[in-house]
Image (tube, rainbow, N blue to C red):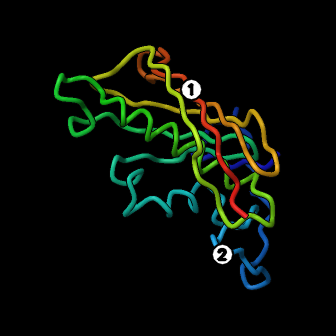
Amino acid sequence: ARSQSATSDPLVPVTTPAVVPRASLTPPPGGYVPGVAALTVDGLNDLLPGTLPGLIGLRVTAVAEGSLDAELVVRPELLAPNGYLHAATVVALADTACGLATRWLLPGTASGFTTLELKANFLGTAREGTLDVRAEVAHAGRTTQVWDAVVTHRESGRRTALFRCTQQVLN
């Protein structure tokens, strides 16, 4: 499995994915080409500025074929008027992790993908700290992918949400 980690944790294997030079590729209309340089931690983080995930402060921390880890620091702008983490913040975190991970497993003929369905079960909340998410593939088919994500509050170790989404592969 290909993986890259933004941490220096000696327990996390760090390898660089095989990279095909962009000049030798003809990307499909959506620009998704599995296995190219953009599918690294740095490459994925470079996609985020100017988008909703960038606005909320999401940061990819590890990526491998079939999984992706990301984090988000909770800050006042991400809270609901009641002072607790807004549900949309958690959904944005989980859906983005699953979406970015989807890029690894797109067929070469795909022009992109879009979220068809999502479900979130909220198990807790937060007012501060950092949220970690791990997205893992449950099904990677030719026309759809199903992804599961677990959102955890780093400081307490408690699960904040369980998330599942279905991605439509666009051809």
Up-down relation of residue 37 to residue 80 (above or below): below
Mark 1, residues whose alpha carbon is within 10 Å: few (<14), some, or many (≥20)? some
Q: x, y (%) of residue 80?
A: 23, 30
Quarter of the image where the C terminus is located: bottom right
Pick out the residue farthest to the bottom: 23
Please, what is the three-letter code of the amino acid marked with disc 2? Pro
Asked whether residue 7 appears in the rendered view, the answer is no
Q: At 27% across and 37% down in the image, what residue appears? A: 78
Residue for badge 2? 29
Q: At 18% across and 22% down in the image, what residue appears? A: 82
Up-down relation of residue 74 to residue 158 (above or below): below
- Labels 1 and 2: the sequence-earlier one: 2
Dot 1 falls on a residue whose secondary structure is strand
Q: At 53% across and 29% down in the image, what residue appears? A: 119
Front-most of 114 and 148?
114
Q: How far apart, in angstroms, are the residues tagged by discs 1 and 2?
A: 32 Å
92 sits to left or right of 35: left
Residue 107 figure quarter: bottom right
Up-down relation of residue 109 to residue 103 (above or below): below
Q: At 57% across and 38% down in the image, what residue appears? A: 117
7 sits to left or right of 92: right
Pick out the residue farthest to the left: 81
Residue for badge 1? 150
Q: x, y (%) of residue 149?
A: 59, 31
Q: Which mark is residue 59?
A: none
Residue 36 figure quarter: bottom right
Quarter of the image where the N terminus is located: top right
84 sits to left or right of 167: left
Please, what is the three-letter code of the amino acid marked with disc 1? Val
Q: Are marks 1 and 2 in contact (CB under 8 Å)?
A: no
